[in-house]
Structure formats: structure tokens, C-alpha cells
Amino acid sequence: MAVRGGMVWLLVGLLAVPGLASATPSRLTIVTSFYPVYLATLNVARGVPGVSVVNLTGPQTGCLHDYQLTPSDLKKLEQASLFVVNGAGMESFLDKVIKRLPGLKIVEASRGIPLLKNASDGEENPHVWVSITNAIQQVRNIGEQLAGLDPTHAKQYRANAGRYVRKLEALRQKMHQALAGLRHREMVTFHEAFPYFAKEFNLRVVAVIEREPGSEPSARDLAQTIELVKRTKSKVLFTEPQYSAKAAAVIARETKARLYTLDPVVTGPADPDAYLHIMEQNLKTLQEALR
Ligand SMILES: [Zn+2]
């Protein structure tokens, strides 16, 4: 009886403390648009009490080019406190979300990052996170914007962002050292995901086989790419785990180039360290392919 009485008193005591009482019911649900932004936000919000991070799209969705929002996506967004997006034109459905949910606060990860234009169509390229320097800027942006929107936990967001940025900086340095001495620097890739990465590590994307998933190249496109690969004398092709390797296999056969897989970090496990692991694997692949 004495113990039970004590418990009740303790609970009443907890509820009476304003900070604790308000922190528990007012849960903050952060929705992220897709995988790379999800990973960055998982790190920034790690261990912050009452905050949950939910990814809008499935772990196998990949890039959001031409993605159409589903009714269940809209339901998730209606329940969200904040929506973290890549920006830079990746979420083509963003205008629709803003119109439909004008009160939803939006965190833009790519704010202030200079954008590159595609050689093929002159459009701004949204794959900024594939450069580690840009990924660092995205983590800082998310940290600062979450701190502003949820000031109670500002210190924690900033500390988490700082801790993750240091891991990314160490990875960047390691990759710079490992890739600096490679003999070959030319890449043929499967979609326009690698220009920021190539720029960062002084590599050159000489041809892109298929601009986006779902658009198989025509016979004419294939023939042109085969000619281009032959002209560049590139001995390696980089496909991606997210895409059908059919076109790449044809080109590899016709040009006698070897086929490797580079991962632009758009699908994978819900592991805060997944970006680091995937980039480590990309490093091994590049060392093997371009030596
Ligand atoms: Zn893409």
C-alpha cells in the first residue's frame, strides 16, 4: 500500500513539472521525402525525446523524379509536424503539398548549395547529396532548421549534426586520399546521379547511359552511347543497384568495357550509418575499376 501510494505521488509529481508534462504528449513527427534525406535526418534527430522520423516513400523507391503522391502519402503528411525535403527540384510534387497543407513546415536540405546543370538537357541536377561536401551541408541545414523550428531541442539537433558531420568529413578525407592517385578518371554512369560526386573527386562523367529509371534507351540512343563509349576508350561502365542493368550489359558487350556497380544512396536499410557504409563500398569499387 505504501509503495502504491508512493507511485501515485511520483506520477503526479512528474506531471506537475511543466517541461516533462508538455514534452510527452506533444510528440513531433518529422516526415522525410526519400532515402538520403531520411538518413541525414535520422542522424540529426537521433535520441531527441518525443521526436520520430518517418520516411514518406518506401526504402526501395529510389529517386523521386516524376513521383506521384499516393493517398497514404498525403495522410502521412497530414499527421506530420515537419517535412524534410531534398529540394533542388527533386520533389516535383512539392507545390501540390504546399497548396494542400499550407501549415506544414518545410525543411529544405539543399538550401544554399550551388547546383550543377545536366549536360544533356540543361536542367538543374538534384543529386546533390552524392557529393560528401554537399551531404555535409545538407546535414548542417537540417540541423539548423530543426533547431529553429523545435527550439526546445536545438542544442541536441546541433550536437547530433556536428557529430555526424565529423564522420562525413573523415570519410571525405579518406576518399580523397584513396582516389587521388587513380590512373583512370573517366566514368560512364547509368543515370545523372554522379556529377556532384565526380566533381568532388576530380573524376569525369563522359557519358550517361540512361537518364532516369523507367526510360529504357531507344536503339538509336544505345547505338550513340556505344559509339561514345568506344570513342572515350572508357574500359569501365558503372550501373546502379536500383536500375535494370540490361542496357548497361548490352553496351558492355558491344564495347568490351567491364561492368561495375556504383550506389547513389537512394535505397537501403534504415540504418543511420548507411550513407557511410555505401560510400565505403563505392570507394572500393572505384579503386578496383579505375586503377
Ligand atoms: Zn535520380
Image (cartoon, rainbow, N blue to C red):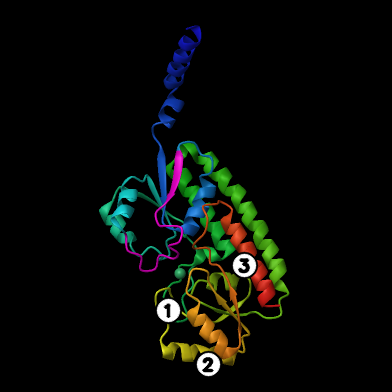
Quarter of the image that includes the C terminus = bottom right
Q: Residue at x 51, y 85 (%)?
A: 250
In the displayed structure, would residue 213 be above or below residue 25? Answer: below
Q: Secondary structure at mark 1?
A: loop
Please give the label number shown on residue 282.
3
Residue that carries the numbered disc 1 in the rendered image: 122
Front residue of 137 and 275: 275
Task: Tell us which disc is closer to us: 1 or 2.
Answer: 2
At label 3, counting other C-alpha atoms closer than 10 Å, the crowd grade (few under 14, some 14-19, many 20 or more) is some
State how many labels appear: 3
In the displayed structure, would residue 252 be above or below residue 61? Answer: below
User: CA gap, disc 3 to disc 2?
Assistant: 27 Å
Residue 29: percent from left, percent from top: 40, 43
Residue 104: percent from left, percent from top: 33, 48
The tag earlier along the polypeptide, 3 or 2, is 2
User: CA gap, disc 1 to disc 2?
Assistant: 22 Å
In the displayed structure, would residue 196 be above or below residue 53? Answer: below
Residue 38: percent from left, percent from top: 48, 54
Type of the residue with mark 1: Gly
Task: Tell us which disc is closer to us: 1 or 3.
Answer: 3
At label 2, counting other C-alpha atoms closer than 10 Å, the crowd grade (few under 14, some 14-19, many 20 or more) is some
Residue 207 is one of the magenta-drawn residues? no
Type of the residue with mark 2: Glu
The part of the chain drawn in magenta is 51-69
Type of the residue with mark 3: Asn
User: CA gap, disc 1 to disc 3?
Assistant: 27 Å
Please give the label number shown on residue 227.
2
Q: Secondary structure at mark 3?
A: helix
Q: Main secondary structure of the magenta part?
A: loop
